[in-house]
Image: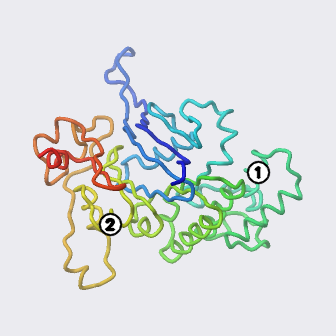
């Protein structure tokens, strides 16, 4: 098995959001966006991350790339610790770790041409590169993502959402990274365009051996592209497994509720299936529930669920679940 490219251990991401009282000496309130998240990622592997809006997926992604501060834990890329790195130290790693953002149009500078947008990482990260070489690299990567060279001098507003996302992918690819973090890269696109972008990412991964972290709400898309899946709720990992195992035999009540909402192509099966509706709203990450953070919405919660935070427990292979009931079953 390949050595991990990325190793994340007990990662915490927190933000100050005012004070608990009116006095200036009152303690600061902290929003706990990510709590004790751990996983590894091998070269050429895709890890899917799923969960409701507000569960900490994007906060986790931005922490991995140095855009959010790390409050605790360890993040190692190719054996190098990233927590606490200064921006000047991060600069040397930017070529190896790139990001594709959710909104394809707003992530592109409207004042720059497509060619300049794609070339910008090269100019920042390889300042000695000749203009002719930059132009050749831009045209090469545009061809790889399906953009014609005659659009190199056009502006983002002249393109569709799918074409703008191809520009974002080209911008990430041009510095030949080892890891690309995809933060809901197809959520703003039509279904047919989503398929084109997903297939493009998979083709590029096979050709270049890229590692991908793919964040999405659409579980069908996650199943198609991911080797392993990590399910998050209120900043914590509820379950993780290889994609086939997770979708075939989900163990956590939250995972089962998410999967029950996935449409089935067969109309008869779709009409007969039971959708598990989660009652209540997502709790505040400023004051999360004690014990299992999912217990306030879990249909199987018992008193023991509020006592202690359940740890991820292995169920065989790569499958692990953080559930108080699973811990009780394992101990009995």
Q: Nearer the viewer, residue 207 or 233?
A: 207
33 left or right, relative to 6: left
C-alpha distance separating marks 2 and 1: 40 Å
Identify whether 86 is placed above or below 195: above
Q: Secondary structure at mark 1?
A: helix
Q: Position of residue 137 (x, y in %)?
A: 79, 61
Residue, far top: 25
The residue beneath circle 2 is: 247
Q: Residues within 10 Å of mark 1 (few under 14, many from 20)?
A: many
Tell me if mark 2 has few (under 14), some (14-19) or many (20+) residues whose alpha carbon lies within 10 angstroms of its own: some
The residue under the point 88% across, 55% down is 131
Left or right: 293 as drawn, with respect to 163: left
User: Which residue is located at x 24 percent, y 38 percent?
Assistant: 309
In the picture provided, is 278 more to the left or to the right than 158?
Answer: left
In this orientation, which residue lies closer to the viewer: 155 or 304? 304
Residue at numbered disc 1: 122
Residue 139 rendering spot, x and y as whole percentages: 79, 66
Q: Closer to the N terminus: mark 2 or mark 1?
A: 1
Q: Residue at x 39, y 57 (%)?
A: 50
Say which mark, if any, is on residue 285: none
Q: Is residue 260 above or below residue 82?
A: below
Cβ–Cβ under 8 Å for marks 2 and 1: no
Front: mark 2 or 1: 2
In the displayed structure, 287 sits above or below 281; it is above
Q: Position of residue 33 (x, y in %)?
A: 39, 40
What x and y, as percent, mark residue 83?
53, 33
Q: Provide the secondary structure element on which disc 2 rests.
A: helix
Identify the image quadrant of residue 235.
Answer: top left
* 150 to the left or right of 213: right
């Amino acid at each position: 098995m390949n050595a991990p490219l990325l190793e994340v251990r007990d990662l915490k991401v927190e933000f100050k959001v005012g004070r608990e009282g009116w006095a200036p000496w009152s303690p600061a309130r902290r929003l706990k966006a990510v709590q004790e998240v751990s996983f590894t990622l091998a070269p050429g592997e895709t890890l899917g991350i799923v969960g409701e809006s507000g569960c900490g997926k994007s906060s986790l992604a931005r922490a991995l790339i140095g855009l959010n501060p790390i409050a605790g834990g360890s993040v190692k890329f190719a054996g190098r610790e990233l927590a606490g790195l200064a921006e000047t130290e991060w600069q040397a790693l930017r070529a190896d770790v790139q990001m594709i953002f959710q909104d394809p149009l707003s992530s592109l500078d409207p004042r720059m041409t497509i060619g300049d947008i794609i070339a910008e990482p090269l100019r920042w990260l390889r300042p000695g590169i000749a203009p002719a070489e930059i132009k050749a690299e831009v045209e090469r990567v545009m061809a790889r993502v399906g953009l014609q060279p005659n659009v190199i001098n056009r502006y983002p507003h002249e393109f569709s959402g799918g074409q703008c996302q191809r520009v974002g992918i080209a911008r990430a690819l041009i510095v030949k990274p080892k890891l690309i973090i995809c933060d809901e890269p197809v959520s703003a696109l039509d279904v047919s365009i989503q398929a084109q972008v997903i297939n493009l990412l998979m083709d590029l991964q096979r050709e270049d051996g890229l590692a991908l972290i793919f964040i999405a709400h659409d579980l069908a898309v996650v199943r198609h592209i991911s080797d392993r899946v990590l399910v998050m709720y209120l900043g914590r990992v509820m379950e993780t497994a290889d994609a086939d195992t997770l979708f075939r035999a989900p163990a956590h009540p939250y995972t089962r509720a998410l999967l029950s909402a996935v449409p089935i192509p067969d109309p008869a099966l779709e009409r007969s299936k039971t959708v598990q509706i989660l009652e209540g709203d997502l709790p505040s990450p400023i004051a999360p529930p004690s014990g299992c953070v999912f217990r306030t919405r879990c249909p199987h919660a018992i008193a023991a669920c509020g006592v202690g935070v359940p740890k991820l427990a292995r169920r065989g292979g790569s499958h692990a679940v953080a559930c108080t009931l699973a811990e009780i079953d394992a101990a009995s």
